[in-house]
Image (cartoon, grey):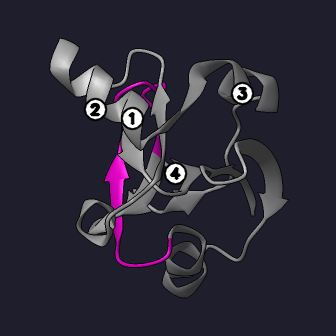
């Protein structure tokens, strides 16, 4: 299924095909997954590493209109009408335009100002 992968270290947003399994999602984010939705439309979510902040992260990203910087990588998928994972239908450029990459210093600056 089509997914959008956000690689915080490489500062890239790419389209890819994944099988949608728990293992594939955990491999992309580097651990246990947690969905976040702020900054996306109502039909999509982004999985991130649930424990990403505990691993002394150095690379982050944030969605425009998101609630906070997110540690590590993310993978965007949609939900089907019955609540199952579905291919991402967002255009790649929509996602690229909404993602800001941050290093640890930028996250600290953001935290102090918010």
User: Which tag, 4 or 1, sits closer to the chain's start?
Assistant: 4
Label 1 or label 3, whichever lies nearer to me, is: 1
The quarter of the displayed image where residue 109 is located: top left
Spatial CA span between label 4 and label 1? 38 Å
Magenta stretch encompasses residue 85: no
Q: Which residue is mark 4?
A: 80
Residue 68 visible? The answer is no
Residue at 42% x, 28% y is 42
Of 112 and 30, nearer the camera is: 112
User: Left or right: 15 with respect to 34?
Assistant: right
Q: Are the two marked residues, 4 and 2, in contact with CB atoms closer than 8 angstroms?
A: no
Q: Which residue is mark 2?
A: 108
Disc 2 element:
helix
Q: Quadrant of the N terminus?
A: bottom right
Spatial CA span between label 4 and label 3? 23 Å
Image location of residue 106, percent across then percent down: 41, 29
Image location of residue 6, percent across then percent down: 64, 48
Image location of residue 9, percent across then percent down: 63, 54
Residue 99 visible? The answer is yes
Spatial CA span between label 1 and label 3? 22 Å
Q: Are the two marked residues, 1 and 2, in contact with CB atoms closer than 8 angstroms?
A: yes
Label 4 or label 3, whichever lies nearer to me, is: 3
Q: Quadrant of the C terminus?
A: top left
Q: Within 10 angstroms of label 2, few (less than 14), some, or many (20 or more) residues?
A: few
Residue at 48% x, 24% y is 41
Q: Which mark is residue 96?
A: 3
Q: Which mark is residue 105?
A: 1
Spatial CA span between label 1 and label 2? 5 Å
Spatial CA span between label 2 and label 3? 23 Å
The quarter of the displayed image where residue 108 is located: top left
State the extent of the magenta-drawn residues as a range: 30-45
User: Which tag, 1 or 3, sits closer to the chain's start?
Assistant: 3
């Amino acid at each position: 299924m089509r997914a959008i992968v956000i690689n915080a270290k490489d500062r890239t947003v790419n389209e890819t095909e994944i099988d949608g399994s728990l293992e594939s999602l955990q491999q992309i984010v580097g651990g246990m997954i947690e969905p976040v939705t702020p900054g996306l439309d109502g039909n999509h979510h982004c999985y991130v590493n649930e424990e990403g902040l505990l691993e002394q992260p150095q690379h982050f990203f944030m969605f425009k209109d998101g609630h906070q910087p997110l540690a590590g990588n993310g993978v965007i998928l949609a939900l089907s009408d019955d609540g199952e994972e579905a291919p991402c239908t967002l255009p790649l450029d929509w996602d690229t335009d909404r993602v800001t990459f941050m290093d640890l210093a930028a996250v600290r600056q953001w935290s102090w100002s918010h």
